[in-house]
Image: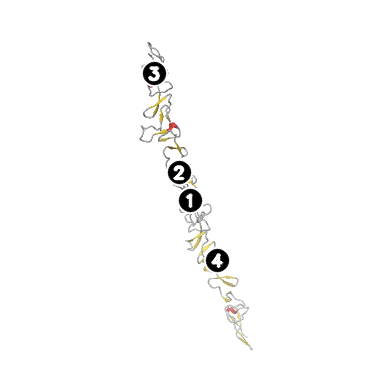
Amino acid sequence: TTTTTTTNTKFVPPEVVLAPYRCWQCDLECSIDGCTGPTSVDCISCENVKYNGNCMSQCPPETYRAGNECYDCDKSCKDGCSKAGSSGCMSCKNIQFLGECIEECPLSHYEVIDLQTNETVCKSCHAHCDLTKGCFGGNIRECNACGSNYFFFEGACVGECPAGTYEDISNENITTCQQCNPLCSTCAGPTAYAADCFSCTHVNLNGKCEETCPPLHYVDSNKNCDPCHEECAFACTNQNANACEVLSGNATTSPCKHAYRVSSGECVKECDAASEFLDAKGQCLSCSDKCSKQGCFGPLASQCNVCSSVMYDGFCVDACPLHTYQDANKVCQ
């Protein structure tokens, strides 16, 4: 019997005829454990590694070695792998995310090219985004929807609705900031009424915001339109009878519906008959102090209805002058 030494120093017996049998050399990739046939798939064990039942010198591309076995890389890998699963890839066919290869980013992330590796990676959506609805970029203007406690306003997800807007929920259950009615400065809804408006841009008239108050109203310190005094004819600055005003350009017109008391500067329904008279301009003027409480028809002592003392020569006087006397009608004769 002779022996032959191969380059791998493995013992390989020559073809031997042992009647009625014949011995054949095992494949070079078989170990010294022998074989059951002439090919690399017939080895009892492998000299190097086994892949799909076939002994070979090293694992083929797109596989990895575990012990003496070669296994296929995960289908998401590109350029080979070092271990099982998508986390063992050398690089990814599609997207790399948290150390693993995936087909697409989760909804809480968006795709972007890593300029250093030129690979597609996943970046987190902005914290203001609804992470169950996704995004298409990393800032507050690139959310598909806003997260809980955030509101959609002018293309961005904001923490609170700005002044002049109110929170609104659409039919799709999306919370947005909508503009208040132009007559409202702060609001909770779209109308100019008190149910929606918290404060008015201009004035409040009976629970509704308006641009201006109607005639015979004034604006109080709370921007409310309050009615003028009932005796005002045109306008006023407050609700008192002495706050009535004429309209611009009508300075000669009385500010009162009925009469204007010059002494107090207030509008009255009628003059005091005991001490005043109404002149042609609608003003209540005082009677002469020589008049009695029965009034007068003018300011002079000669215009008293009755003198408080006596009358002399058509004028009311305190006493008859010398050389005259007072008759029964209180007239100096």
In this figure, which residue is indicated by the disc labeled 2?
A: 209
Q: Confirm or deny contact between disc 3 and disc 2 (CB under 8 A).
A: no
Q: CA distance from mark 1 to mark 2?
A: 21 Å
Residue type pointed to by label 1:
Cys
Residue 228 at x, y percent in the picture: 44, 35
Q: Is residue 18 visible?
A: no
Task: Name above or below for residue 257 compared with residue 16.
Answer: above
Q: CA distance from mark 4 to mark 1?
A: 43 Å
**Which of disc 1 and disc 4 is earlier in sequence?**
4
**Which of disc 4 and disc 3 is earlier in sequence?**
4
Residue lying at 39% horizontally and 18% vertically, measured from the top left? 316
Residue type pointed to by label 4:
Ser
Q: Confirm or deny contact between disc 3 and disc 1 (CB under 8 A).
A: no
**Which of disc 2 and disc 4 is earlier in sequence?**
4
In this figure, which residue is indicated by the disc labeled 4?
A: 86
Q: CA distance from mark 3 to mark 4?
A: 121 Å
Residue type pointed to by label 3:
Cys
In this figure, which residue is indicated by the disc labeled 1?
A: 177
Secondary structure category for the residue under label 1: strand
**Counting other residues with Cα less than 10 Å from the Cα at mark 4, is it few (<14), some (14-19), or many (20 or more)?**
many
**Which of disc 2 and disc 3 is earlier in sequence?**
2
In this figure, which residue is indicated by the disc labeled 3?
A: 316
**Counting other residues with Cα less than 10 Å from the Cα at mark 2, is it few (<14), some (14-19), or many (20 or more)?**
many
Residue nearer the viewer, 328 or 62? 328
Residue 264 at x, y percent in the picture: 43, 28
User: Which disc, if any, is residue 113?
Assistant: none
**Counting other residues with Cα less than 10 Å from the Cα at mark 1, is it few (<14), some (14-19), or many (20 or more)?**
many
Secondary structure category for the residue under label 3: strand
Secondary structure category for the residue under label 2: strand
Q: Which residue occupies the extreme front position in the image? A: 328
Q: Quadrant of residue 202?
A: top left
